[in-house]
Amino acid sequence: MYVGRIVAVGRSSGRSFVAYRVSSRSFPNRRAEVRGRSILVSPIDPSDLARNPYIAYNCIRASGNIAVVANGTQSDMIFERIEDGAKPIDALAISLVAYGYERDELDTPRIAGAVRGDRAWLGIARKSEYRVSEFKLEEGQALMVATYEKTGFEPTALSGSASEIARQAFDLSFERPVCAAAALAAPDWSGYDLAVYNPH
């Protein structure tokens, strides 16, 4: 099954995390890279951006006790609104409504998630609907949403260190994996450990 991009939120060993996976049929030549407190997804060949401007963005932003994950530049807006004092559920809702779905040939939905403490949020903006939900994460619980097919908020299996979660996200049994990333809260919630998995 091809589900496109995947956003996940969860809790492992008392620490909350976000995770992201790029799956792509059209632009598989991409990689994830840690840049400070962010993780950037970008094409290996910059000329691909001329064909599709949506393929480069910060998929994860993390600082202090908050981490945000998304399949587009809405991650920056969500993160900055939360830093400015907005409730995460409001930041996701406002940003997803403001951006809407991607105006590409597939009307690709925008998806996003966030974690803070034992709370998590997931959202999706499709051509036909907007949906944002809040969850209280239990130990060992993880939830995901994808751009296609798996557009509900449903359980998935991810746990371990940031690097282990990134690799597990890449290895989820959906077609066309490209790269993956994760951010796991530090034990004292002073920040996040960031990790990526690129197969090549």
Image (cartoon, rainbow, N blue to C red):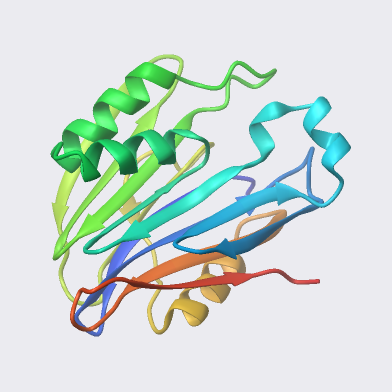
Q: Is residue 171 above or below residue 69?
A: below
Image: 191 above or below 131: below
Residue visible at 50% across and 64% down in the picture:
36
Residue 183 in the image, given as x and y percentages of width and height? 41, 67
Q: Residue at x 15, y 52 (%)?
A: 135
Q: Residue at x 70, y 48 (%)?
A: 42
The answer to whether residue 129 of the structure is visible from this angle is: no
Q: Which quadrant does the C terminus fall into?
A: bottom right
**Would you say residue 16 is visible in this rendering?**
yes
Question: Where in the figure is residue 125, as x and y percent of width and height?
Answer: 39, 25
Residue 188, quarter of the rendered image: bottom left
x and y percentages locating residue 100 in the rendered image: 43, 19
Give left or right: position of 74 versus 42: left
Compared to residue 161, the image places residue 29 above or below, namely: above
Q: How many marks?
A: 0
The answer to whether residue 98 is left or right of residue 54 is: left
Q: Position of residue 146 (x, y in %)?
A: 48, 44
Q: Observer-nearest residue: 117 or 127?
A: 117
The quarter of the displayed image where residue 51 is located: top right
Q: Residue at x 82, y 26 (%)?
A: 50
Does residue 78 appear left or right of residue 182 in this picture? left
The correct choice, above or below, for 159 with respect to 120 in the image is below
